[in-house]
Image: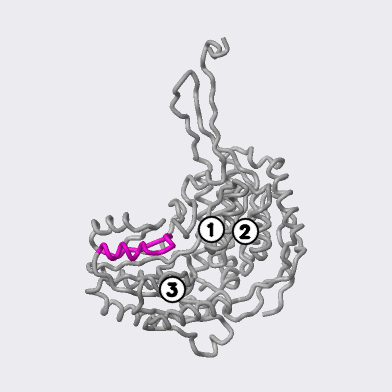
Amino acid sequence: MPNPELLPINVAGEWRLGGGAETATLYPATGEVVGRLRAPSLDDVQEAIDQADHAFRTSGWAQRKPHERAAVLHRVAQMIRERAEPLAQLQRLDNGKPINETRALVASAAGTFQYIAAACETLEEALTPSRGDFMSMSVHEPMGVVAAITPWNSPIASEAQKLAPALAAGNAVVVKPAEATPLLALELAKICEEAGVPRGLVSVLPGRGSVIGDAITRHPLVRRVSFTGGTATGKHIAHIAADKMMPVSLELGGKSATMVLADADLDHAVNGVLYGIFSSSGESCIAGSRLFVARSLYDGFMQRLTARAAALRVGDPADERTQMGPLITARHRESIESHVALGLAEGGRLLTGGCRPEGAQFERGYYYRPTIIDGVQNDWQICQQEIFGPVLVAMPFDSEADLIAQANDSLYALAAGIWTRDYKAAWRIGRAVQAGTVWINTYKQFSISTPFGGWRDSGLGREKGRLGIQQYMEQKSLYWGLNDNPLPWAH
């Protein structure tokens, strides 16, 4: 693969080389360079935000009728679909996901813009019940400049989920993609520009979160930050936001519980558990990484699950048969290896995996085999810390009360899965489990129409849904006096 030329970044609609240090994005399957750019300098950040504020105030975007903004977003959706295969291939190179997954991510991004466009066009304000000689109503106004800070595991989908509603609301948006995966955000900015989003309303500033992300978050003209990523960084952003009195949405980590009850359909449960943890190589905030199985099923279920996990196809992301590609970086793989070593040192039993795959095709990439560990206790570190990789810990449970208590015994509360034929049990457990999303007899299914977010260390706020646009707006109340006589107080 030839050494690519330096790519320009987008500073408020101006495509140019950044003023910071040179960085590269590597193909995780081979370690080869697929993109090079110069990160923005702090001066670039300042200019991008200043120009975004100017564009917000002067471009007329915020004043367009909702159906006019919606028409542009519909064009974005159409252009993503027209370029779907090149975008999916670029996403594969950027973060190493198998091509079938990256195609799904691109389709998701197009669907997000389409849905948000429809929601923008049909979103209604409220005429509130009058309690006096006046008419009262509630309306929403755009905030100004907002920031979208996105992760490396699902770039184009995450960026669409923030960029589409922020633009629909009438804002200017500064996107800070993950340092390791900047390429799809740059492509999405080009598409928005070509579709008719006014110049200056979208900036893309790749770089280190601790430098570029921090500068964006602290800037006084940035009115809101939407962040998806690690819990420690999310808490840091929350501290800055508290000082600024700035709203944030934080979609953070997870250690999600998957629960297999004694009456579960085992074919569905085995497939669902495998998909929940090992798709995306486990690099997913909602990965079902803690497995609880009814004790009466435990041994047989684990034998079946382990055999199926060991047979998963780990390999080249360009191969449509591949089920698990490489991890994002060599450093991240080392982190996962250290977590597994700790779990085994704590007393866990390795059922499968726990190592790098062998063979010449794996030597240059950052591959790791699907791994299952049991013989653990829920309070051990391997059961409490987010690993963000293809590592499943498994435990039996003895009663519904025991199951709920263990599932909720975590700092995280992002997602959960329940496998049962008993709809009453599914209802009881689904309501009792503390999580932002609960899947019943399925897992890791998403809809842009359904709000998403977590509790506790898994985050604050919600994204998606018809009202997700209003997360990027300020609410305002208007009162219209209808009284025939002057207000009596002054008489």
Circle 3 — which element? helix
Q: Count the numbered circles shown.
A: 3
Residue type beneath disc 1 = Ala
Q: Is residue 401 magenta?
A: yes
| Residue segment shown in magenta | 400-420
Asked if the magenta segment contains residue 264, the reply would be: no
How packed mark 3 is, by other alpha carbons closer than 10 Å (few <14, some 14-19, many 20 or more), is some
Contact between marks 1 and 2 (CB within 8 A): the answer is: yes
* Disc 2 residue crowd, few under 14, some 14–19, many 20+, Cα 10 Å: many
Q: Amino acid at mark 2?
A: Leu
The figure's colour scheme reads one colour
Check the image and report above or below for 484 versus 390.
Answer: above
Reading the image, the residue beneath label 3 is 381
To which residue does mark 1 refer?
Answer: 109
Counting from the top left corner in percent of width and height, residue 368 is at 49, 81
Left or right: 190 in relation to 116: right
Real-space Cα separation, disc 1 to disc 3, in angstroms? 35 Å
Q: Specify whether residue 349 is in view.
A: yes
| 363 is higher (above) or lower (below) than 395 | below
**Residues at marks 3 and 2, CA–CA distance in whole angstroms:** 39 Å
Q: Quadrant of residue 296?
A: bottom left
Residue pointed to by mark 2 = 188
